[in-house]
Image: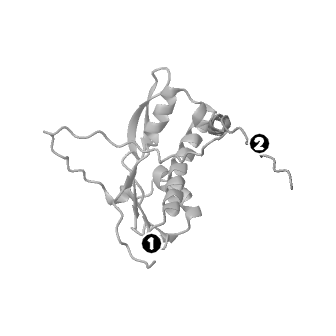
Amino acid sequence: MADKRKVQEINASSMADISFLLLIFFLVTTTMSVDKGLSRQLPPPLPPNMEKPDVEVKERNIFVVLINSNNQLLVQGELLNINQLKDKAKEFIENEADKPNLPELLPLDVTFEGGVTESVLTTKNHIISLQNDVGTQYQKYIEVQNELVAAYNELRNEYATNRFGCSYEALSDINKEAVQKIYPQKISEAEPKKYGGTK
């Protein structure tokens, strides 16, 4: 008759401790990619007793960007490629040649480092109006946002390089604020609508 031996049981009492240590190890060593949102600061709410002011904006000061449900870009009534948007936006914001169809250049008092105040011609009343269709893909919306923000960043950087001989990021806080005042980021976003196009 065959000899029946009892199989020894594996001691599993420390398995829970090992699993817990492995879990902690992976939590500590794993890097998570965090999606950052768009950096937008909402204006402070109006006091309850204050009426909403009527703001009249001249048509020449508005740069209209529409994205339809087919992710096509219509800029100032013209069909445009995403790669052309940044340059078109820069031309609008800067209006270097003082064209009558682009935002009006107005004098603006700007204080630089050292308390030096200068009058600078700038399109301070310009507005970029971004409107998208309810069917617009989020990726296309982000691409358009990135191009518009890049237009502002490039203009600020060019101004800093021409005036101070360094990049915008290398400027002191006071000079950064001054350059931001010359090129204020004004992107207005309307509630998504149905602009046409089929999905």
Q: Which label sits in the foreground, 2 or 1?
A: 2
Please identify the quarter of the rendering in which residue 86 is found: bottom right
Which amino acid, mark 1? Ser
Spot occupied by residue 158 in the image (x, y as percentages of width and height): 59, 42
Expressed as whole percent of the image width and height from the top left, the position of residue 51 reads: 15, 44
For residue 198, above or below residue 43: below
At 48% across and 66% down in the image, what residue appears? 137
Residue at mark 2: 8
Q: On the picture, is 106 further left or further right than 70?
A: left
Asked whether, in this view, residue 191 is left or right of residue 67, the answer is left
The reply to whether discs 2 and 1 touch (Cβ–Cβ < 8 Å) is no
Camera-nearest residue between 28 and 80: 28
Instruction: Left or right? Give the position of 99 relative to 28.
Output: left
Up-down: is 117 above or below 67?
above
The residue to which callout 1 is attached is: 69
- Residue displayed at 37% across by 56% down: 189
Please report the residue visible at 49 percent of the width from the left and 36 percent of the height from the top. 179
Say which element carries label 2: loop
- The residue positioned farthest toward the top in the image shown: 114
Furthest residue to the left?
49
- Left/right placement of residue 131 relative to residue 145 reads left
Q: Nearer the viewer, residue 32 or 54?
A: 32
* Label 1 crowd bin: few (<14), some (14–19), many (20+), radius 10 Å: some
Locate the N terminus by quadrant. Answer: bottom right
x and y percentages locating residue 159 in the rendered image: 56, 40
Classify mark 1: helix, strand or loop: loop
